Image (cartoon, rainbow, N blue to C red):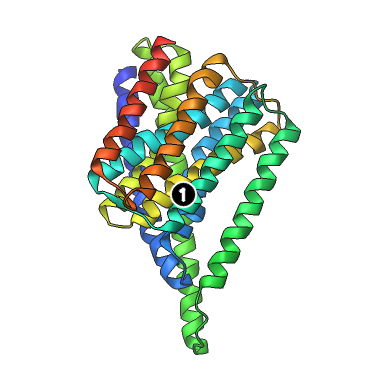
Amino acid sequence: MYEAMNILIFIVSLGILIKGADIITNYASRLAKLWGISELVIGITIVAISTSLPELAVSLISVLGSLGGIAVGTIIGSNIANIGLIVGISALASPLLVTRKFIREGIVMLFFSIVTAALLLDGMFWYEGIILIIMLFGYLYYLVKSATSGASHKRTSRAAEEKKHRAVIKCLLFCALGAAFIAIGAEVLVYSTINIATWLGISEVVIALVAIAIGTSLPEFATSVVAALKKMRGISVGNIIGSNIFNVSILGLVALFGPIPTEAIINNINIPIMLVLSFLLILFMRKGMKIDRTEAIVLFGIYVVFLILQFAY
């Protein structure tokens, strides 16, 4: 009875999660049009922040409970899942076309990942966390400034301005609603996933590095696949790039509440795989300005290898 209840909770929470992703993709796309900025920027900012909420919640809870290792495993594992699992499956569903802006933002993501890897070599402390936070704010300032300077400023009537203002408020409220659905759905989903995994006799280490990481990546998965199927490729890829940047920045925020230790499996396997996948994502985007199904299979194959290594290490 207990196991059946967990499976039911898993299914219901997954439905809530997917509905939240659908709401965000729809209204984030409308925001992009209202503000006159690209879907890529919206994907990197509003959508990415919303879909990174589960990682933030899990990481904060872990560090406050003196379980910093789970925080690192969740973030690194989530970034690996974002590229290997999510981009892989999204590109299999519909090849992802990109522009030079995607490549530029991808390089920023790789830079964030490399800096995070360097800071994690001996664990992360509060002063190192501040470095990541400063980098994040600098990046957000650059994004907002470039988006604002690129937006058109046509003269409109007062009535049109008020109508646009109401439409923006409505979109933001629905994005917040979608984010709430995602946060609640993902949190319950992770809880039920852990219970199911424990019932099946899977070790706690694998649960921390794989199950929780996949669980917290489900918002990105749902959002990116839904966006890809709707041909909103800017949101689909931008969500992953932005989410990976925000994820590693989360470690900086969490480090302010307590030191974050690392384990051998993180330094020897997970971080190198995260960097390889980040590099390949940029390489594939540069080659033909798209991620095709063959490249998607490569990314997904690396993710499968990552899963196998978690059990074999």
Q: Measured along the vertical axis of the image, is residue 156 above or below residue 124?
A: below
Residue at 47 percent of width and 68 percent of height:
37
Identify the image quadrant of residue 4.
Answer: top left
- Return the x and y of residue 185 as percentages of the image width and height: 41, 39
Q: Which of 50 and 35 is in front in this view?
A: 35
Res. 71 in view: yes
Vertical comparison of 94 with 70: above or below: below
Please state if 245 lies on the left or on the right of 25 as rendered: right
Residue 259 percent location from the top left of the image? 70, 25
Residue found at x 47% / y 22%: 209
Side (left or right) of 92 relative to 304: left
- The N terminus appears in which quarter of the rendering? top left
- Which residue is tagged 1? 179
Question: Which percent across, then down, holds residue 156?
Answer: 49, 87
Residue drawn at x 69%, y 36% is 129
Q: Nearer the viewer, residue 8 or 294?
A: 294
Nearer-the-camera pick, 128 or 190: 128
